[in-house]
Amino acid sequence: MNEIESHKKNHFVPRVYLKSWAQNKSLNLFTLNLKDKLTRKQTTGDIAHKKNLYTLNFESKKDKTLEKIMYPMWEIQWPKIVENLRNDIIDEYTLRIIKQFVIVQSFRTPKFVRENYISVKGTEYEMQEKMMFPLFLIVGLPALLDNCVCKLYKINSVENFITCDNPSTHWYLHNNDRFSYISGIMIRQDLQKDKRYKIICPLTPKYLAMLSPNLGANNITESDKKKFSIKVVNSEEIKHINRMIEHGADKLLMAKYPLDLIY
């Protein structure tokens, strides 16, 4: 691995995704550090990255990263999805890419990678064992896409959804509207059949997706899988959702305007 490759920045929150929160062509957005409580103006390239987070350190001359292998499949398409959302175009293609984005992003955090994948070194058997993480994405992702239902939340006011350094967040929603954070998808087997188990993910400052990946266990029909619903949210619901996003954050919140971070 050469000097440039050894210092590669892997953006676990993609820059193409954060552009929706950026201020025009400057690519600046506002961040709030949960540790020091300071709001800063930063560029999309300067936040939510970690060196060699997805590097596969095979003992060969060429280094590979999961970022190059897996994630471009939807990143290339994301600008079109944002344009469709801006124009309220929700067709089958848009819906599938949204599901794909939310599910892949739910794996794309330093904590998940650290706990479920270790750089490959050693015997061929160990190499195959450590490859279970990318294989899980390849094999598990289509099954999740085919067996989840999506609900979209839309804002029609000047208020905005915020996002965070863990934008695709797993929640176990209680009947009394209290919420608690659950880490990991398809890891907690006891939650797979619970209808209250959801993944929430801001798509743009005006759209948020909520997925129900557990519905695959309930024998939903093919037409159900292609359906979606849109709910226009009010100010109180926006505040509630933004609090959920805040609780799902690891260290950082991101917003289009500083006032969006105050609710």
Image: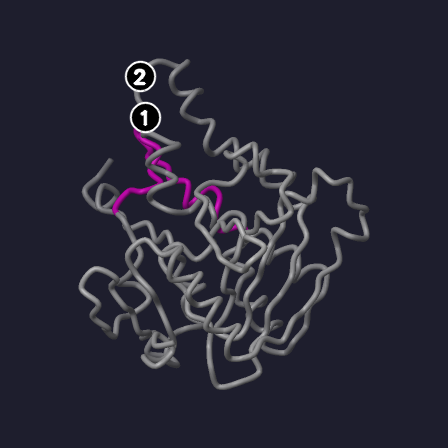
| Residue 55 among those drawn in magenta | yes
Q: Is residue 99 placed above or below 202 in the rendered structure? A: above
Residue 87 % position (x, y): 63, 78
Three-letter code, disc 2: Gly
* Quarter-of-image position of residue 54: top left
Which numbered tag is attached to residue 141?
none
Q: Residue at x 37, y 38 (%)?
A: 113
User: How would you rate the neighbour count of disc 1 (Cα within 10 Å): few for under 14, some for 14-19, many for 20 or more?
Assistant: few
* Quarter-of-image position of residue 114: top left
Q: Which residue is drawn at 34% across and 53% down?
A: 11
Three-letter code, disc 1: Ser
Which numbered tag is attached to residue 60?
1
Of the pair 129 and 258, the residue shown nearer to us = 258
Q: Give the range drawn in magenta.
A: 51-73
Residue most toward the front? 176
Q: Residue at x 54, y 48 (%)?
A: 103
Drawn side of residue 152 relative to residue 240, left or right: right
Disc 2 target residue: 122
What SS does tag 1 mark?
A: loop
Drawn side of residue 38 relative to residue 55, left or right: left
Q: Is residue 30 placed above or below 122 in the rendered structure? A: below
| Residue 188 among those drawn in magenta | no
Residue 78 % position (x, y): 53, 62
Of the pair 92 and 249, the residue shown nearer to us = 249
Q: How many marks overall?
A: 2
Q: Do the residues labelled 1 and 2 touch (CB within 8 Å)?
A: no
